[in-house]
Amino acid sequence: MSALCENRALVVPGDVLYEGRIRTGENTYRNQGKVSATRVGLVDYGRGMVSVIALEAGFSPLVGDLVVGNVTDIELGQWLVNIDAPSEAVLNIPDAIDAPFRSDIVMPEILDVGDTLVAKIVDMDRRRTPIISILGKGLGKVEEGFIKRLTPSKIPRLIGKKGSMVNMILKETGCNIVIGQNGRILIQGKTREQEMMVVRVIDKIEREAHISGLTNRVQEYLRKLKEENN
Amino acid sequence: MASRGGIVSRLKRKKIQEVVAEGKRMDGRGLEDYREFVVKTGVMEKSEGSAEVKLGKTWVVAGVKVGVGTPFEDTPEMGVLMCNAEFTPVAHPTFEPGPPDEESIELARVVDRGLRSAEILDFKKLALVPGKLVYLVHVDLYVLNYDGNLIDASALAAIAALKTAVKPVHKVKEGEIEATGKKESLEVLKEPVAVTMVKIGDSLIVDPSADEEEVMDLRLTITLEKDGSICTIQKSGSEGLTMEDIQKAVKIASEKAAENRKLIAGKADA
Amino acid sequence: MSKRKKKTKEKRFDGREPNEIRPIKIESGVLPNADGSAYIEMGKNKVVVGVFGPREMHPKRLSKPNMATLRCRYHMAPFSVDPRRSPAPSRRDNEISMVMRYALEPAVFLERYPRSAIDVYAEVLEADGGTRTASINAATVALVDAGIPMRDLVSSCAAGKIDDMLVLDLGDYEDKEGQADVPVAYMPKLGKVTLLQMDGVLSPDEFEKCVSLAIDGCNRIYEIQREALKKKYGLTEEEVKE
């Protein structure tokens, strides 16, 4: 029974991480008494289990996730919304308007193809289709701002421990930021300079998410950008 | 080019219009600035000529193949030039594999017209046995990544590849040809350069990104030769141009074409 | 008409040893719009592979209820060969597309993404014998780059026979003039062959030797694929401080 790699070593799919009994975490699989990696990332042997912190992973929707999406189609009683997941998400009318059913509802007047929205995943149906809702504080159609993308697996680095990273960015730039777990970030600033600072910081996180000391580097970087602007 | 499927993001259009109205662009460029434009020639050995162009994140490869075959019926004494463009499915999530659609055909034709109007080849000289055997010059444009302005990138890739291309030397004997195994330069006489602009609101902006093409009102490409003469124009999009727009566009294009022409020679390290 | 190229005893027409593979270069993450991508040079072969997915599959009626559909497309640029070829897909293109899928499917956790599609597009920019193995090698790196969960990497190499000599990694000339060609794809950690084809004539003993030789080639290529995947994250903290 043994760990076969150094903690935090870079592993690729198929690399054998552990032989013997152990609890397995994400991005691993068991095969004939061995635990192997399923994605490229950093192996972690903490907390009595073996897992891989993936450096590349698509968005895997989970109930409770906040997502930013765009409407791609309108069907009877529901909108289809692209949230960069393996399946398109579904928004049913009762999850979009908080009112009893009316037969004269014109769906495009509420949300049309091409609209951007902030939603929460409230359910996954039997076929793993994410069901979303825009009822709730901070949710709904987006009228201002623009979307910047970040690899979904790096979103936690943008948020930081207990929001430390994103709060620092909000404070230093004065922008409003909504972070979609699906790798889409909505940015609204008062000036273009402020918005560009957020864009540059997100680019930096995209490049350096896997290198420790990120929070300090971003703080330093923001300071430098602010100086450039003045 | 609106996003494939015709869906334009309302939010994106609104934001880009606001930013452009302030004289700025989403990536921080000026309205008349090109993105980083890099050209490398001689990148592929099996082609008689080749070039790779990166314009921002747009990535196009051009391959020139020179063979011998029968001329067109209506021009029996002239060599043949043909341009073809492939929008490969790796270039964008909405690109599907399949035969060329109207956008890739338009790209091939705009690049072709730019080369033809500029008379880059002496077609009569490319006839080996007039009426029977001529040189066939194929330019194939391969789009590997789409982030706007395929025309300028492809046109430059085409001319850079042609300029550095060779043709197999054939001996002509009694109406037949014999390969000699030698190669000589294709002899490209001119250097047409395309400059593409889009209009968003009241502003003309140069070298549109994919987002800017998605929300544009119209697109205008002007191709110019080294002596400043205009050899091709292509307008697409649903809105109209004012006379003032056209004059301004010609002025911008003349300036930018001269700058971009310097890239044709390509970088030494292929 | 072929021209037999002179070779010195025990060396091949390009000077290689019988079990020498051509120089290989692999880079991951080269296509900004793809979910995952890789570029490979294997000798003079140049292939770009882009991966999209898992994503919604259209048309929906063709999707599988319990797993993702892996769709592979192998395509050659008109200027990739001499003489120029038509851009339209040929029967060989279709066969290689299928063969790529057979090689890669066993390694991908398709059952985690029911009803969706994973699209793998290989674009050959220059061909010089062995483009199917080059495409499979790059496709593997692209799939990992896309974050698609896999059981193992898939490495691919061809062995064969030319001038009564068993050789590894056949070039274009050897492909065309040789006596046999055995392309193999292999999952190195799991020790399983996922693609096995043969063209030509070999005795059973020669065939076994070829497969062994090809697997040896696959193992060597595997190391190059690993390096390519790790290279992207190679920056140290010192290098990051501007």
Image: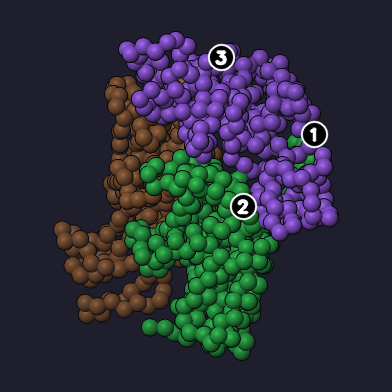
Chain colours: A purple, B brown, C green
Q: Residue lying farthest top?
A: A99
**Residue located 45% across and 14% down the image:** A97
Q: Amino acid at mark 1?
A: Gly
Q: Amino acid at mark 2?
A: Met
Q: Amino acid at mark 3?
A: Gly
Circle 2 residue: C150
Q: Label 2's element?
A: loop
Q: Label 3 lies in what chain?
A: A
Between circles 2 and 1, the one closer to the viewer is: 2
Circle 3 residue: A136
Mark 2 and mark 1 on one chain: no
Query: Residue C218, image x and y in percent?
Result: 63, 68
Discs 1, 3 touching: Cβ within 8 Å: no
- In this rendering, position of residue A42 left or right of residue B35: right
Query: Residue A127, image x and y in percent?
Result: 49, 37
Which quadrant is home to the N terminus of chain C?
bottom left
**Residue located 72% across and 43% down the image:** A25
How crowded pointer 1 is (Cα within 10 Å; few <14, some 14-19, many 20+) is rated as few
